[in-house]
Image (tube, rainbow, N blue to C red):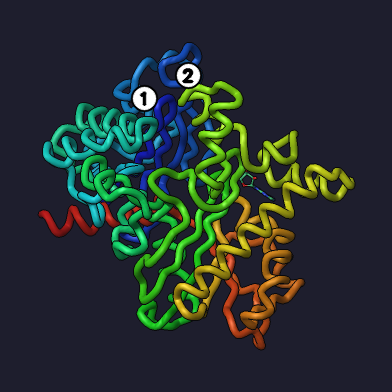
Amino acid sequence: MKLLVINAGSSSLKYQLYDMTDESVLAKGLVERIGMDSSILTHKPTGKEEVTEVSEILEHTTAIRKVLEKLTDKEHGVLESVEEIQAVGHRVVHGGEAFKGSALVTSEVKAEIRRLFDLAPLHNPPAILGINAAEKNMPGVPQVVAFDTAFHQTMEEKVYLYPIPKVLYKKHRVRRYGAHGTSHQYVSKVAADYLNRPIEDLKIITCHIGNGASMTAVQGGVSTDTSMGLTPLEGLMMGTRSGDLDPAVVTFVMNKEELSLSEANSMLNKHSGLLAISGSSSDMRDITDGMAEGDPNSTLAFEMYEYRLRKYIGSYAAAMNGVDVIVFTAGVGENSAIVREKVCENLTYLGVEIDPELNKVRSGDPRRISTPNSKVEVLVIPTNEELMIARDTYRIVQENQ
Ligand code: AMP
């Protein structure tokens, strides 16, 4: 079965075409600047040259039509006809409490995703645009939605509730939902496979640290705690997001600086984290370069970032009463040897010991960086959210045939 995985943002749309007979990627690409002049479509068929095309793409239906044209193009295509695509899988950020796993798209499912617009005003509306656009371009082709929150629906009430008036949960569903669930689920499964151990027996801490960053305690294969909350602002320090802080900071600063709600939101989501402390960049490469050059602000940003990561690992080890495996993934986790080194350097009390040479190895495959003596397996596992969505789509479509 060939299927298309789509990740629709408000002005962008990423895609990957899979052949599920061997889970190979036939082509992938990205449409950027949808709704603006000079939209850009970048298409990369596997084993062929990448092509870029600039045109006017005003909305998502046209974006998908252009993608399908590229996929069936004589020169750059990988398909004879669009009919070869037998299913479409969509990434959706927020599944609220309604979705504990991926689901076949129906009108009720779409209505539920719309009901969740309140909880993810920036992310869920484009997902609906993507689903509608795919339905228009490929009528009758089954569509599946995979949610970033679904994996964390196994968290217990004591973990997901905030200690605030309960009426806020009843009225507005204010609770912790988490995010990056597809990634945490994927890397925890790959970790168990890599170690050749049943996931049911493992206590795993997965660190998805990219531009956004979150950590999950995966016990027996299910998420028992995760660092993001009602929104992806809680938890670790990130590129431009603050992560944890005293909630009183928000009201205090809003009062002193006369900030509106949206200004406060923007401060915490877009102007905090590494960017705020370094004063120069949200990118870990720039931070570590700055640190190597002796820039005190970059050094402080790095130290805060690493310290907070380490504190979270400690708290999840405490929450699970131990840890067997620590996984690093996403942009920083997969690529920054120094972040991994500094975090692990301070986890000796857990029996963590990494091999500096293995830590330096760069590879696109899952790998171990801990020594044979380490009491905790430390792994670097490239995440692959698209593959996870493709697998779910394939399974759900088969189940519903
Ligand atoms: P992601 O959100 O997973 O795509 O990760 C993006 C982030 O990964 C970037 O903002 C960088 O901070 C970080 N990153 C990518 N490559 C490297 C690298 N070689 N070293 C350190 N950080 C990196």
Residue situated furthest right in the rendering: 294
> Is residue 235 left or right of 342 when viewed as pictured?
left
Residue that mark 1 sits on? 63
* Front residue of this view, candidates 47 and 343: 343
**Which residue sits at x=25%, y=42%?**
84
Secondary structure beneath dot 1 equals: helix
Q: Quadrant of the C terminus?
A: bottom left
**Mark drawn on residue 39:** 2
Q: Which amino acid does the dot numbered 1 rest on?
A: Ala
Q: Residues within 10 Å of mark 1 (few under 14, many from 20)?
A: many
Image quadrant of residue 297? top right
Q: How many marks?
A: 2
Q: Position of residue 263 (x, y in %)?
A: 52, 24
Image quadrant of residue 5? top left
Residue situated furthest bottom in the rendering: 373
354 vs 150: above or below: below
Q: Are marks 2 and 1 in contact (CB under 8 Å)?
A: yes
49 vs 314: above or below: above
Q: Which amino acid does the dot numbered 2 rest on?
A: Ser
Q: Is residue 365 visible?
A: no
204 vs 253: above or below: below
**Which residue sits at x=54%, y=23%?**
259
Secondary structure beneath dot 2 equals: strand
Q: Position of residue 270 (x, y in %)?
A: 57, 32
* Front residue of this view, candidates 376 and 89: 376
Whole-number angstrom distance, CA of label 2 to CA of label 1: 9 Å
31 vs 4: above or below: above
**Mark drawn on residue 189:** none
